[in-house]
Image (tube, rainbow, N blue to C red):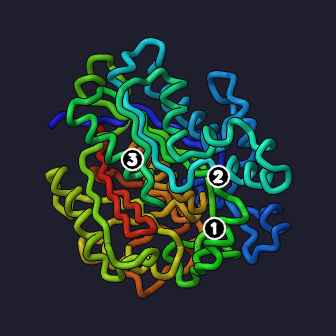
Amino acid sequence: MSGVLVTGLGLVTAAGPDADSTWAAVLAGRSAARPDPTLALAGLPVTLSCRVEGADELPVRPRGVRHLDPAARMALTAVGEALDRAKLDPAEWDGSRVAVVTGSSMGGEQTRQTAAERFASGGASSVSAYFLTGFLPNMVCATIALHLGVTGPTLPVMTACAAGSSALGAARQLLTSGQCDIAVVCGVDASVLPLYVAGFAQLGALSDRRSCPFDADRDGFVIGEGAGALVLERAEHAAARSAPRLASFVGYGTSTDAHHLVAPHPEARVAERAVRAALAEAGAAPGDVDHINAHGTSTPRGDAMEATLFARVFPHRPPVTSAKGALGHTLGAAGAIEAALTVLALRDDVVPPTAGLTAPDPALDIDAVAGTARQQPTSLALSTSFGFGGHNSVILLAPA
């Protein structure tokens, strides 16, 4: 099997419009959550969010994208940064040997909301001709391919909050099967909208105080948005062009709980299969893992499930972190954003702190990093993602 390398990455989050600003906030344990006037005006019980400020002003390349949904704009911005870091120019590649794989939970929801409001007030003729191309869940993937001249495989993945990680796994399979040499992967969601916040609030999933994964006082997540993009390449292709080598993508595992539409299985037995599948593909033992980037949503049941999983599979207690304390829960973007952060952690030999974590829950038998970043060399890092519907997705990364 051909090896797969990460050669580029880009980020757009509530903490900043690029990877450097986002990484600085995560390393500092600084939360990007803030009061959201739009949610307050809607009379919602939850008014905190991690919204990307100025999403409509992001410097998307190329020009001529005035009608794009914010999700597509964030995605193109993150992808542009990832390609720059990978030293790739789409004008120079063979587009038939490039894939685009995207992960999202919603699609272009701001476009859908605007169209619904116009239809209700002004009838069919008031709906923009750009409605469907902005809203349909496949259109972020199609837009990236169109702007980059990609004619190879394109695949939009929608496994809820596991989608970003699932997209990375699907891209890895396209590369190792020989169907492409380069895969541009992007997880994105821009759904900080009253309707969806109301839905999560009705489920009791949100906090209006703070996001504090693995804390004894946790009571839910703060909803966020953003995009994470990674460029993956077959190792031989990357070597031939002397590409940057940011990390090796050495293992992937996926499974489905078939337990409940929204609640994780409390014993995490099926999620464990995904972890062990990733380890097996990498030829690694549980004891080889020395850093875990957890899904860590700050919900009582979600964090407890993950802690149960980690304690059982990794009794040596590797340090655990969650970025959601800093960035909020970015839904379908989370897996890709957190994979990019894991790559940066490998680069800098550091495990970031979990923002908001001040009183670790004594019932959780894990070493959750709190307060300040922990310097340590890492030879194998695990990143976990879990989504509504029982979707489990796990990736393993190693230094390149």
Q: Are marks 3 and 1 in contact (CB under 8 Å)?
A: no
Mark 2 or mark 3, which is nearer to you?
2
Identity, as a three-letter code, of the amino acid under mark 2 = Glu
Q: CA distance from mark 2 to mark 3?
A: 20 Å
Mark 2 or mark 1, which is nearer to you?
2
Which image quadrant for residue 266?
A: bottom left
Identity, as a three-letter code, of the amino acid under mark 1 = Val
Secondary-structure class at tag 2: helix
First in sequence: mark 2 or mark 3?
A: 2
Which one is in front, 244 or 359?
244
- Report x, y in % for residue 259: 34, 78
Q: Which residue is mark 3?
A: 167
Is residue 350 toward the left or the right of residue 314 in the image?
A: right
Whether residue 269 is visible to the viewer of this picture, yes or no, is yes
Which image quadrant for residue 156?
A: top left
Is residue 105 toward the left or the right of residue 293 in the image?
A: right
Identity, as a three-letter code, of the amino acid under mark 3 = Ala
- Report x, y in % for residue 300: 50, 81
- Report x, y in % for residue 330: 56, 57
Q: Which residue is mark 2?
A: 109
Secondary-structure class at tag 3: helix
Whether residue 23 is visible to the viewer of this picture, yes or no, is no
> What residue do we see at 55% from left, 62% from top?
324
Q: Which residue is mark 1?
A: 222
Which image quadrant for residue 212?
A: bottom right
Q: Are marks 2 and 3 in contact (CB under 8 Å)?
A: no
> What residue do we see at 74% from left, 62% from top?
34
Disc number for residue 27: none
Q: CA distance from mark 3 to mark 1?
A: 23 Å
**In the image, residue 399 above or below residue 342:** above
Disc 2 crowd, CA 10 A, few/some/many (<14, 14-19, 20+): many
